[in-house]
């Protein structure tokens, strides 16, 4: 096996479907708030009126769309790869090589285990541990491709001493 078996992974805010979803939802609320007349926001019998909801929804939409747009403009990224020069596993969040991001590096020979926790009610969790049992900072489910177990199995196949634990 070669290091090519462990693919390079990189995602940015511009390629993250969640940012595009936030931008779309925020834009819909912003648009709806601009086309709905607050005076018309009453029940048919006129007893229940909430004209304040329209500008509130419009403001809510503007904040969501602005937040998603600014995040896409800044375009923070995350990912991991095996450095061909050193053989180190490198991962990052933010901007690799800059002071504004969080990154880590370890040679796979120093990794003891990779733990994947499957959770039904929230996102899965991924943890990487070194030979002394310490959890490594900033390495989690955001820096490796899904399905996480497939990536972990490739890493363990290349370095058989790495134990892959899957819970849940």
Image (spheres, rainbow, N blue to C red):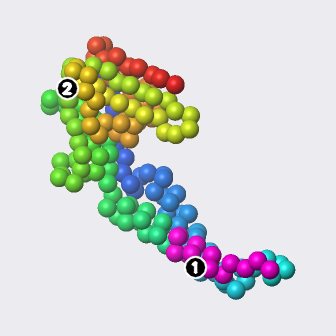
| Real-space CA distance between mark 2 and mark 1, rounded to the nearest whole angstrom | 54 Å
Q: Tell whether 39 sits left or right of 161.
A: right
Label 1: element kind: helix
Q: Where is residue 163 drawn, in percent x and y? A: 34, 16
Total labels drawn: 2
- The boundaries of the magenta stretch are 47-61
Q: Where is residue 47 drawn, in percent x and y? A: 80, 80
Camera-nearest residue between 98 and 133: 133
- Compared with residue 28, is residue 44 higher up or lower down, i.e. above or below? below
Q: Tell whether 121 sits left or right of 103.
A: right
Dots 2, 1 in contact, CB < 8 A: no
- Seen as rendered, the residue at the extreme right is 45
Q: Tell whether 68 sits left or right of 74.
A: right
Q: Residues within 10 Å of mark 1 (few under 14, many from 20)?
A: some
- Compared with residue 2, is residue 61 higher up or lower down, i.e. above or below? below
- Compared with residue 25, is residue 158 higher up or lower down, i.e. above or below? above
Q: Where is residue 167 drawn, in percent x and y? A: 47, 23
Mark 1 or mark 2, which is nearer the start of the sequence?
A: 1
Which mark, residue 55?
1
- Compared with residue 130, is residue 62 higher up or lower down, i.e. above or below? below
Residue at x-position 85% and y-position 80%? 45
Which mark, residue 107?
2
């Amino acid at each position: 096996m070669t290091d090519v078996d462990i693919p390079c992974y990189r995602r940015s805010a511009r390629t993250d479907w969640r940012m595009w979803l936030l931008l779309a939802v925020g834009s819909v609320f912003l648009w709806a708030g601009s086309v709905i007349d607050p005076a018309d926001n009453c029940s048919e019998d006129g007893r229940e009126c909430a004209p304040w909801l329209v500008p509130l929804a419009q403001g809510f939409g503007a904040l969501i769309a602005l937040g998603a747009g600014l995040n896409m403009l800044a375009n923070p990224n995350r990912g991991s790869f095996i450095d061909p020069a050193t053989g180190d596993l490198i991962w990052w969040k933010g901007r690799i090589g800059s002071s504004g991001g969080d990154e880590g590096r370890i040679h796979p020979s120093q990794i003891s285990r990779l733990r994947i926790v499957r959770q039904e009610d929230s996102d899965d969790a991924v943890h990487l541990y070194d030979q002394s049992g310490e959890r490594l900072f900033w390495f989690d489910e955001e820096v490796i491709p899904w399905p996480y177990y497939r990536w972990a199995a490739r890493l363990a196949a290349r370095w058989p001493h790495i134990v892959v634990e899957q819970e849940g």
